[in-house]
Image (cartoon, rainbow, N blue to C red):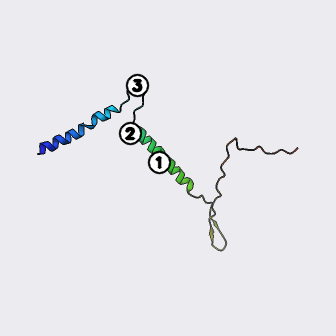
Amino acid sequence: MRQIVHALLLIGLVAPAPAALAQTPSKPGDKPAQETPREMLEDATRKALQAFELMLKAIPQYETPEILDNGDIIIRRKPPKPQTPAPADRVPPKTKT
Protein backbone atom coordinates (compact mmCIF):
# COMPACT_ATOMS: atom_id res chain seq x y z
CA MET A 1 0.00 0.00 0.00
CA ARG A 2 2.81 2.39 0.81
CA GLN A 3 4.41 1.81 -2.57
CA ILE A 4 1.17 2.74 -4.32
CA VAL A 5 0.94 6.00 -2.37
CA HIS A 6 4.55 6.82 -3.21
CA ALA A 7 3.99 6.03 -6.88
CA LEU A 8 0.88 8.21 -7.02
CA LEU A 9 2.73 11.03 -5.28
CA LEU A 10 5.59 10.75 -7.78
CA ILE A 11 3.17 10.77 -10.71
CA GLY A 12 1.42 13.82 -9.25
CA LEU A 13 4.73 15.68 -9.07
CA VAL A 14 5.90 14.74 -12.55
CA ALA A 15 2.56 15.15 -14.38
CA PRO A 16 2.48 19.01 -14.33
CA ALA A 17 5.91 19.21 -16.02
CA PRO A 18 4.59 18.86 -19.63
CA ALA A 19 2.03 21.59 -18.97
CA ALA A 20 4.78 23.94 -17.78
CA LEU A 21 6.89 23.17 -20.83
CA ALA A 22 3.94 23.94 -23.11
CA GLN A 23 3.93 27.55 -21.88
CA THR A 24 7.40 28.33 -23.21
CA PRO A 25 7.47 30.65 -26.24
CA SER A 26 7.56 29.00 -29.63
CA LYS A 27 9.57 31.79 -31.29
CA PRO A 28 12.65 33.50 -29.85
CA GLY A 29 10.92 36.90 -29.80
CA ASP A 30 7.70 35.70 -28.14
CA LYS A 31 7.14 36.49 -24.49
CA PRO A 32 6.08 33.63 -22.21
CA ALA A 33 2.46 33.59 -21.09
CA GLN A 34 3.42 33.98 -17.43
CA GLU A 35 5.74 36.48 -15.81
CA THR A 36 8.96 35.32 -14.28
CA PRO A 37 9.23 35.41 -10.48
CA ARG A 38 11.66 38.32 -10.75
CA GLU A 39 9.17 40.38 -12.80
CA MET A 40 6.40 39.55 -10.34
CA LEU A 41 8.59 40.60 -7.40
CA GLU A 42 9.59 43.86 -9.11
CA ASP A 43 5.96 44.64 -9.89
CA ALA A 44 4.85 43.87 -6.32
CA THR A 45 7.67 46.01 -4.91
CA ARG A 46 6.76 48.89 -7.21
CA LYS A 47 3.11 48.71 -6.14
CA ALA A 48 4.06 48.53 -2.45
CA LEU A 49 6.27 51.63 -2.80
CA GLN A 50 3.47 53.52 -4.57
CA ALA A 51 1.04 52.56 -1.79
CA PHE A 52 3.57 53.71 0.83
CA GLU A 53 4.04 57.03 -1.01
CA LEU A 54 0.27 57.61 -1.12
CA MET A 55 0.01 56.80 2.57
CA LEU A 56 2.72 59.36 3.42
CA LYS A 57 1.01 62.01 1.32
CA ALA A 58 -2.25 61.39 3.20
CA ILE A 59 -0.65 62.22 6.57
CA PRO A 60 -1.29 65.89 7.35
CA GLN A 61 1.74 68.12 7.82
CA TYR A 62 2.03 70.45 10.82
CA GLU A 63 3.89 73.69 11.54
CA THR A 64 6.19 74.24 14.49
CA PRO A 65 4.25 74.28 17.79
CA GLU A 66 3.67 77.66 19.45
CA ILE A 67 3.56 78.08 23.22
CA LEU A 68 1.32 80.93 24.32
CA ASP A 69 1.86 83.04 27.44
CA ASN A 70 -0.86 81.17 29.30
CA GLY A 71 0.83 77.79 28.59
CA ASP A 72 -1.42 76.66 25.77
CA ILE A 73 0.31 74.88 22.91
CA ILE A 74 -0.96 75.52 19.39
CA ILE A 75 0.00 73.19 16.56
CA ARG A 76 -1.30 74.47 13.25
CA ARG A 77 -1.82 72.31 10.23
CA LYS A 78 0.12 73.38 7.12
CA PRO A 79 -2.08 74.26 4.16
CA PRO A 80 -1.85 71.68 1.38
CA LYS A 81 0.55 72.49 -1.42
CA PRO A 82 -1.30 73.65 -4.53
CA GLN A 83 -0.86 71.32 -7.43
CA THR A 84 0.70 73.01 -10.40
CA PRO A 85 -1.51 72.81 -13.50
CA ALA A 86 -0.22 71.29 -16.70
CA PRO A 87 1.55 73.74 -19.06
CA ALA A 88 -1.43 73.75 -21.44
CA ASP A 89 -3.76 74.83 -18.61
CA ARG A 90 -1.64 77.79 -17.53
CA VAL A 91 -2.94 81.19 -18.47
CA PRO A 92 -0.27 83.85 -19.03
CA PRO A 93 -0.60 86.86 -16.71
CA LYS A 94 -2.23 89.93 -18.20
CA THR A 95 0.16 92.76 -18.84
CA LYS A 96 -0.73 96.37 -18.21
CA THR A 97 0.23 98.88 -20.86
Per the image, label 1 sits on a secondary structure element best described as helix
* Marked residue nearer the N-terminal end (1 or 2): 2
Q: Quadrant of residue 60?
A: bottom right
Q: Residue at x 45, y 42 (%)?
A: 43
Asked whether 87 or 79 is in front, the reply is 87
User: Residue 18, how many percent across, how many down?
Assistant: 28, 33
Q: Residue furthest left?
A: 1
Q: CA distance from mark 1 to mark 2?
A: 16 Å
> Does label 2 or label 3 sit earlier along the sequence?
3
User: Residue sitting at 32 percent across and 35 percent down?
Assistant: 20
Q: Secondary structure at mark 3?
A: loop
Q: Between residues 79 and 30, which one lies in front from this camera angle?
A: 30
Look at the image and tell me in which quarter the N terminus lies.
top left
Q: Residue furthest top?
A: 28
Amino acid type, residue under disc 2 in the picture: Pro
Numbered circles on residues, count: 3
Q: Position of residue 37 (x, y in %)?
A: 38, 39
The quadrant holding residue 33 is: top left
Q: Is residue 21 left or right of residue 51?
A: left
* Distance in Å between CA atoms under marks 2 and 3: 20 Å
Q: Which residue is mark 2?
A: 37
Q: In the image, residue 80 lies at what x, y percent?
A: 64, 55
Question: Where the C terminus falls, by quadrant?
Answer: top right
**Compared to 41, does 26 lie above or below?**
above
Residue identified by numbered label 1: 48
Check disc 3 and report the residue beneath it.
28
Q: Nearer the viewer, mark 3 or mark 1?
A: 3
Tell me if label 3 and label 1 are in contact, CB under 8 Å: no
Name the amino acid type tagged 3: Pro
Residue 19, by quadrant, is top left
